[in-house]
Image (cartoon, rainbow, N blue to C red):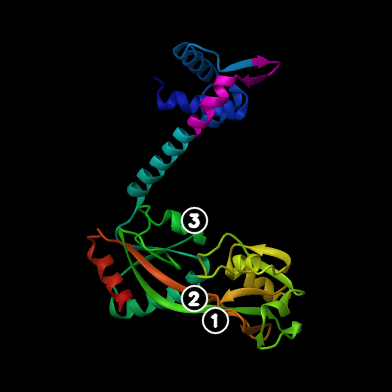
Amino acid sequence: MLSSKQIEIFYQVYKNNSMSGAAEKLQISQPSVSKTLAGIERNLGFKLFLRKGKKLHPTIEANELFEYASLVTNQLKNFNYIANTYKSRSFDYINIGTTPSLAETIVPKIINNYLKENQSARFNLINLNSIDLVEDRYKPDIDITICFNAKEQNNIDSVVLKKGEHKVASPVSFSIPSLVNINDLTEYPLIAITNLLSLYSEESVMNYFIKNNIEMNFVSKSDSYSAALAMIEMGMGISFLDDNTLTKANLKKVKISEIKDVKFEYSINALIKKDVVRKDLINFYEYLSK
């Protein structure tokens, strides 16, 4: 059997194609790496690397084992991340995981109103994009998640904070009408919102284009609504943005138009684990529920 340290050394030697590169990455001596690798090969009973010139070349067996070494290494990273989070985490704060656009709009308003009634409360905002937020919402540094269109989970309580829809945002200079069909927008440069899929709208904007064979004029991409809005204000193109983000728009530079032929609706949800016992978290979530 190999120890986790031996697996980590094998992983780094494989990744760097050299013992010196692995030693530098792990901050240990090269002789220590060489000695450990020799011990691993004795333990396993076969060679992992063949030396050709100054480089190490993995054997067939090493190629097979690397996939599993990657899984072990990533699990160790996750373990250390969680452990360090528990070690450094302050329980004096309510840690809210949210997206950049919500952290600039609805979340500060919620916190400000709550503090008027609960002056001793303390908050920490953790900004992630929507997909990372959904994947990371169970980590110990996030107490409550506020995000778009969260799916129901057995061990999670969820409340809808707001419902709304997407609209067309464009530079004023484009002179787009206040009420417009999607097919009327195909010639305009489009700033696509990436990696959001159905998270930001119940009917995905991108999926709608594909299903209806609509060819848009894609010129830029952004995984942030706020960044897309900034590009629109610079005159770079149009985009489909939620009306919550559009409350920040500079209306001297941005025209907001309703979509006639389809509605891209969304909800903003707050989520909390059902087994929470901290009174401050329960109080805040109850406030959100009201």
| Magenta segment | 51-70
Quarter of the picture containing the C terminus is bottom left
Sequence-wise, the earlier of marks 1 and 3 is: 3
Sequence-wise, the earlier of marks 2 and 1 is: 2
Disc 1 target residue = 247
Q: Is residue 109 left or right of residue 121?
A: right
- Labelled pair 2, 1 in contact (Cβ < 8 Å): yes
Q: Is residue 77 left or right of residue 23?
A: left
Q: Residues within 10 Å of mark 1 (few under 14, many from 20)?
A: few
What residue is rendered at 65% in x and 15% in y? Answer: 51
- Amino acid type, label 2: Thr
Q: Which mark is residue 188?
A: none
Q: Is residue 150 left or right of residue 24?
A: left
Disc 3 target residue = 132
What residue is rendered at 74% in x and 74% in y? Answer: 186
Q: Which residue, as the protein is rendered here, is positioned at the far front?
A: 212
Distance in Å between CA atoms under marks 2 and 1: 8 Å
- Amino acid type, label 1: Thr
User: Residue 178 in magenta?
Assistant: no
What residue is rendered at 44% in x and 39% in y? Answer: 77
Disc 2 target residue = 105
